[in-house]
Amino acid sequence: MQLPDPTRRFICRTCQRETGHWPIAHGPVKGSEKLLLGQETSSQIFQVVQCRDCKSTTYCLDTRVHPGHMMGDSYVERTDYFPPLQVRTRPDWFSQLPEGYQSILAEVYQAIDNSLFFLASTGTRTAVDQLIVEKIGDAGRFEDKIIELVERKIIDNTQGEMLLALINAGSASAHRSYKPDSETINHMMDILEAIFYSLLIEPDKRKDLERKAAEIRKSTPPRKPARES
Ligand SMILES: [Zn+2]
């Protein structure tokens, strides 16, 4: 069996980029041998590697194709990472969200990482609905809830329209088997993250800035009275 190449670079989930890795363990995956066309065969090799920069470990499976005797060298056709690599990076304020929202959004992100866009789309609607109910209670239809959010100045008109587009897409997935493509699901997540940030993170940030402004005011020496001419 081919020995792992110590100079090979892998994608590190923690560093979120390709980095040098130490090989920790490797071996053939039992029962993974497959006959392809002609003499061509394929098999899988597992590898546990450790990032040289941050020391986090990664498990991956290489699918290696063997073209056959005198037909050329074998090559890695594909590498699968476990757990799968994050397709959508969680925003840096994710851990500041209340635990309940972290739990539901973690499932949405996992669905996206696994290309389960149908489930992810339905999940965005559920997450947003929970947020709305927390803010204004269960006020009936989504359209009515959004009108109330705008009237109570919790969101503005533009945010209301964005939210409705997101909810309609999520509802289409829940009721009419609508499966958004990766670009659309990313747009839906952009909106979802903006709404969550605006309703749950920004108010605390603002309070913090107001407190800092008060401290600055306290420590700023007062202006000298203007000299009389
Ligand atoms: Zn790393």
Image (cartoon, helix red, strand yellow):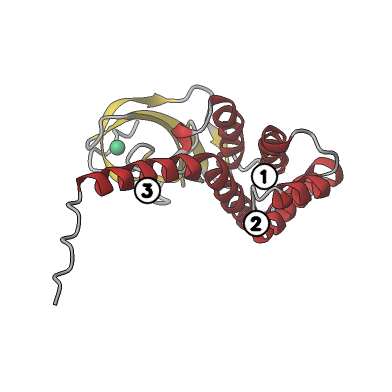
Residue type indicated by callout 2: Asp
Check disc 3 and report its element: helix, strand or loop: loop
Q: Looking at numbered disc 1 in the image, what kind of residue is underneath it?
A: Phe
Pointer 1 residue: 117
Q: Nearer the viewer, mark 1 or mark 3?
A: 1
In the displayed structure, does residue 70 sit left or right of residue 199? Answer: left
**Residue 146 locus on image (x, y percent):** 75, 49
Write down the residue under mark 2: 156
Residue neighbourhood size for the residue with mark 2, other residues' Cα within 10 Å, grouped as few (<14), some (14–19), many (≥20): some
Describe the element under mark 1 as helix, strand or loop. Answer: helix
Q: In the depicted view, which residue is nearer to us: 214 or 14?
A: 214
Where ligand 1 lies, by quadrant? top left
Relative horizontal placement of residue 130, taking residue 113 as reference (left or right): right
**Which residue position is annotated with label 3?**
73
- Give me the residue at 85% from left, 39% from top: 140
| Of the pair 40 and 187, the residue shown nearer to us | 187
Q: Is there any visible trace of residue 198 in the rendered image?
A: yes
Q: Earlier in the sequence, mark 1 or mark 2?
A: 1
For marks 1 and 2, give the CA distance.
28 Å
On the image, the x and y values in percent for residue 128 come to 68, 40
Disc 1 packing (10 Å; few <14; some 14–19; many ≥20): many
Q: Is residue 68 visible?
A: no
Q: Within 10 Å of the Cα at label 3, are there few (<14), some (14-19), or many (20+) other Cα atoms?
A: few
